[in-house]
Image (cartoon, rainbow, N blue to C red):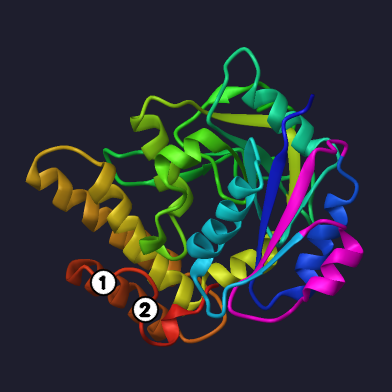
Amino acid sequence: MAPPVGIVVVNWRRREATLACLNALAALEYFEWRLHLVDNGCEDFDAVELERMFPGADYLRTGHNLGFAGGSNVGMRAALEAGAAFVWFLNNDAEPEPAALRELVAAAEGALPAAVVGAKILQKARPERIDSVALHVDLGSGRVVLRGHDEIDRGQFEDLAEVDAVTGCAMLVRSDALARLGGFDESFFSYMEDADLCLRARAAGLRVLAAPRARVLHDRPVAMRGRQSTASLYYATRNHLELVRRHGRGPLWQRGMRAAVVVALNLAYALRPAGGPARARAAAVWHGLLDYRRGRFGACPDSRSSTP
C-alpha cells in the first residue's frame, strides 16, 4: 500500500498562483495524498470552495501572517495528526509534473532511504532551464548556492544524489523526521528555514537527497522580483547570518570573515538593477544585519515583516 502523503501549500495573497498549483495537484499520478491548504493571514479561499475542488481537503486559516516557516508548520501539524507518513511542502507558485510525487516517495523509500527529498525545480517560463536541483551550503565561506541554477537541462542531474540541502519549493519529509526535528524553525519566519531544516537533519544522521526525476515548475520571474523586495532582502540577510552562525564552525576570526562575506553577498544582490530605489534595498540589508546582532528574529515589527 502506498504511504499517505500530506501536501502542505501555504497561500499569502496570491490566489491565482495557488489555483494553478492546485490544478497541477489534480493531475498527480500518486493518489494517496491529502491537501492541507494554509491561508496565511489572508482569506483568499474558504472551506466550501476547497471541499468542492478536493473533497476531504483540510482548510486552515492562521489569522495573521506566520511567514513561510510558521504557515508550513501549521499545515505540517495537521498532516501529521491526519496520519501522513510523509509531508510534502510545496510552494504555492510551484506546479508539479504528474510523476513528481511518485518519484519523490520512491526516492525516499529506495536503496538509499532518506528523511528529506527535494525535486528538480525548473523555470516555468523556460522549462528547459533549471531553477535548482539542490542547495550547496559552504559553511567555510558562508555561501549558499542553488545547484544547477539557470543551466540548460541536458540530463546532467538525473541521478539520485546526497546533498547538503534542498529547497522548500518542493520538499518531501518523512513524518518521523519532522517529529524529531520539530518542523521548520519559526524564528526564521521566511528564507533559509529550508536549509536550516536540512542541516539539522544531516547533523542528526539523517539523509538528504536530491531526486531530479521528480520535476516541478516554478514561476521564477515572479519569485525573483519578490526576492529583491526590501522585505525579502531584510529576511535573507538576517537569516543567512543566523544560518552560518548556527551551523558553521571555526575560530572567531573565521566566523567574522564568514559574516562579512554573507553581508557583502546580500548587499551585492540588493544593488542589482531592480524596481525601487537602491538605497531602500541597501537599507533593508543593513536592517537585517542590525536585527541579527540584536537577536531579533521572527516577524519584524514593521513593514519589512510581510512575506515576499
- Identify the residue position indicated by label 2 in the image: 300
Q: Would you say the residues marked 1 and 2 are in contact, meaning their CB atoms lie under 8 Å apart?
A: yes
Amino acid under label 2?
Cys
Left or right, 294 with reference to 196? left
Q: Let me know if residue 77 is in the magenta part.
A: no
Residue 119, percent from left and from top: 66, 38
Check the image and report above or below for 158 versus 26: above
For mark 2, does the 10 Å Cα neighbourhood hold few (<14), some (14 to 19), or many (20 or more) residues?
some
Q: Which residue is mark 1?
A: 296
Indicate the secondary structure of the residue bearing disc 1: loop
Q: Is residue 10 left or right of residue 273?
A: right
What's the amino acid at mark 1? Arg
Q: Nearer the viewer, residue 69 or 270?
A: 69
Q: Give the spatial CA distance, label 1 vs label 2.
A: 8 Å
Tell me which segment is drawn in magenta: 29-57
- Where residue 220 sits: x, y (%)? 68, 60
Residue at 41% of width from left, 61% of height from top? 186
